[in-house]
Image (spheres, helix red, strand yellow):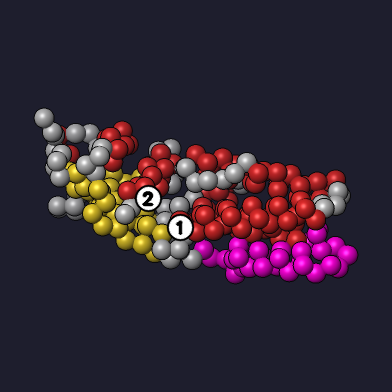
């Protein structure tokens, strides 16, 4: 026997159960090209890194590795902006490993090798160890793959959607309002807000992870 949303507690457990069923579909979704408030983009830093790597001046490997790390840092902050987390990360002074942990917890691929790039940069800046050509080339390849893979969360990124399950009688509207740092879930029929979670809530990451999982339903 199915139950209408009115007869069920609408929370994260309900939403996971709802969207994990085979009958669940995304009836529609809206997208946005997310423009983080930065003058320099991750791709700009990759361009600088490529330029440094190809030009054989005395410290080209040092500059290239530094720009590779900046490209990854900039992409991390761009993703955090698109997920409504950038201001929180600044307020709480998240470091590089903390940002990786956050993106991993959300299901965004953050290879462990990114930590190795950071370690190389730390050795460069704090132990004054010069990187070699192969290390910098490998770091650049990883940075390019990471940025290309995660572009789907920034370019034509899903910001709202309508998951439905006609068999169960559910049809919801979900919105990730990244500019105002909140997620809302409403009934499609009468627009009644069922859930509103902002970034200051301990539950925000759980709902954000669920929202990101809806990318798998896009067809």
- Answer left or right for 174 relative to 41: left
Q: Residue 5: x and y, percent?
A: 17, 39
Q: Residue 110: x and y, percent?
A: 57, 45
Closest to the observer, 157 or 180: 157
Q: Residue 60: x and y, percent?
A: 81, 63
- Cβ–Cβ below 8 Å for labels 1 and 2? yes
Q: Residues within 10 Å of mark 2 (few under 14, many from 20)?
A: some
Location of residue 23 (image quadrant)? top left
Taking the view exactly as shown, the residue that stands out farthest to the left is 1
Residue holding disc 1: 152
Question: Which corner quadrant holds the N terminus?
Answer: top left
Question: Which corner quadrant holds the C terminus?
Answer: bottom left
**Residue lying at 49% horizontally and 46% vertically, measured from the top left:** 108
Q: Which residues are magenta?
A: 36-63
Is any atom of residue 50 visible in this view? yes
Tally of marks: 2
**Residue lying at 58% horizontally and 55% vertically, measured from the top left:** 145
Is any atom of residue 175 visible in this view? no
SS assignment at label 1: helix
Q: Residues within 10 Å of mark 1 (few under 14, many from 20)?
A: few
Residue holding disc 2: 215
Closest to the observer, 171 or 5: 171
Residue 7, label in figure: none
Location of residue 56 (image quadrant)? bottom right
């Amino acid at each position: 026997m199915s139950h209408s949303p009115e007869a069920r507690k609408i929370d994260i457990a309900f939403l996971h159960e709802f969207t994990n069923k085979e009958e669940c579909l995304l009836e529609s979704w809206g997208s946005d090209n997310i423009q983080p408030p930065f003058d320099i983009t991750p791709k700009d830093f990759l361009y600088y890194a490529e330029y440094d790597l190809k030009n054989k001046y005395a410290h080209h490997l040092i500059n290239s590795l530094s720009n590779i790390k900046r490209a990854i840092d900039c992409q991390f902050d761009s993703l955090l902006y698109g997920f409504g987390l950038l201001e929180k990360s600044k307020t709480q002074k998240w470091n590089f490993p903390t940002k990786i942990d956050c993106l991993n917890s959300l299901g965004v691929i953050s290879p462990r090798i990114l930590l190795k790039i950071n370690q190389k940069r730390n050795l460069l800046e704090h132990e004054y160890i010069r990187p070699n050509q192969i290390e910098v080339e490998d770091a650049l390849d990883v940075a390019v793959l990471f940025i290309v893979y995660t572009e789907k969360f920034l370019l034509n990124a899903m910001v709202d959607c309508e998951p439905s399950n006609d068999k169960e009688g559910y049809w919801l509207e979900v919105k990730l309002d990244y500019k105002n740092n909140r997620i809302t879930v409403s009934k499609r029929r009468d627009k009644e807000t069922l859930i509103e979670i902002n970034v200051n809530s301990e539950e925000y990451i759980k709902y954000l992870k669920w929202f990101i999982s809806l990318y798998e339903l896009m067809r």
